[in-house]
Amino acid sequence: MTHNNFCWIATWKITDRCNLSCTYCDPSIMKRASAPEVIDRFEVVNRIGAYRPHVLNISGGEPMLVGELPELLSAAKKSWDPFIRVVHNGTAPGKLESAFPYIDRLVISIDGPGEINMATRGLGGDAVLEKIAKLIDVRPADSPPLPEITVNTVVTENNIDTLPGFAARIATVSPSVNLALLPVMPVECELSILRDREKGYRRFLDIYAEMKAAHPPTVHNFDCLMRHDDLRRIQCYNQYFTIRFSPRGDFFTCGANLGSQLRRSDNVIAKVFKKGGIRKAFTMIMKAAKGKMGKVDFTCRNICNCENWLDMLFWGMNTGYAPATLRGLRGRLDGTDYQNLDKFVKTNINPNFNISWFKELIETS
Ligand code: SF4
Ligand code: SF4
């Protein structure tokens, strides 16, 4: 644990370059595929390895554009053997083949069938599914085993009605390709189906039932959002379990570090400084450093749609989404990890947390 973070999952945004220009991507951050990027990524792997995250999540930009990707993943596997998840934009999954021996899960983002994906990403959704089908069907006997494949789809007003057909199409590609559905953020945006929360959620669940019937390995992550009354100030526990790295290996978290805890403790700071008590301030800092400042503040003002999957489990609810992501932790947590987790969750989140249930989910999911 470091800076009050369990470091179970590291997300490395391995490059800022991409060969697509999706309508919702931030062009001020994303560079074109041919842009120069001089980075010693092996040094970054060492830096990440110092935290020994159980799951290494490679995102971008587009990871396929990093020529040394297979060697980097191989180095991570050799060094601390994390579960490796690579997120790909669907342009050429076959080009990742030389990295397959080191990838446990390949996540391919598709916004929906045919024209739907074309409108947002400039790439037909069916064409991406065909590429996945080719990858699965046309494999020479001596090729490396395929990683588990998950299609990630953000649900919006633009694609929701097409999703049952999309799920049925994925079933024809392979019954074992997972489909994960995430709500578009922020929920008050025009594309969101949750602007009217209850009504939107009921509509989603009806469509989800059709999708599940067409393609059983479909899961969704809407419940984490639905448990919040105020979506501008959600409580997300995942920030204490994930660490993030920029392409150059600069470390940052969603917010759960000492500095942010102090910043968030506005009332305490105001109280201390009103009374002018330097000694009190020092005591407060020491308490924060020892993690004894009282209840941890989980408020997230960034709010993303994909990372808060641990939350429901900490409340003892198995929504189906988390077990799909938990597989990466199987066999990677020891007795001390479970003990520390039990203490953290019981103290800060749910006094009735059942660690044996959680452990069983991880070890058998
Ligand atoms: S694939 Fe991802 S990184 Fe590339 S342009 Fe689209 S949203 Fe941005
Ligand atoms: S919602 Fe996303 S950004 Fe916010 S704390 Fe959770 S994981 Fe981090």
Image (cartoon, helix red, strand yellow):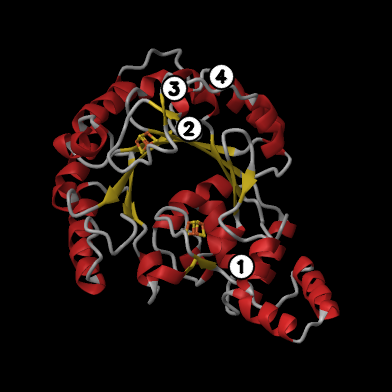
- Amino acid type, mark 1: Ile
Please state which of the two labelled residues, at mark 3 or mark 1, is closer to the viewer. Answer: 3
Is residue 338 at all visible to an observer of this figure? no
Seen in the image, is 125 located left or right of residue 277? left
- Amino acid type, mark 3: Leu
Image position of 260 with respect to 96: above or below = below
Near-viewer residue (286 or 236): 286
Disc 2: which residue? 16
Please tell me whether mark 3 sits on a helix, a strand or a loop: helix
Near-viewer residue (102 or 268): 268
N-terminal label among 2 and 4: 2
Please tell me whether mark 1 sits on a helix, a strand or a loop: helix
> Disc 3, disc 2: CB below 8 Å?
no
N-terminal label among 3 and 4: 4
Distance CA(mark 3)–CA(mark 2): 18 Å
- Mark 2 residue crowding within 10 angstroms, few (<14) / some (14–19) / many (20+): many
Image position of 61 with respect to 160: above or below = above
Q: Residue 335's x, y, as percent?
A: 72, 58
Disc 4: which residue? 68
Please state which of the two labelled residues, at mark 1 or mark 2, is closer to the viewer. Answer: 2
Disc 3: which residue? 96
In the rendered structure, find residue 355 and report the number of the disc placed on it: 1
Distance CA(mark 2)–CA(mark 4): 15 Å
Q: Residue 365's x, y, as percent?
A: 49, 52
Distance CA(mark 4)–CA(mark 1): 40 Å
Distance CA(mark 3)–CA(mark 4): 11 Å
Q: Residue at x 41, y 22 (%)?
A: 33
Near-viewer residue (30 or 69): 30
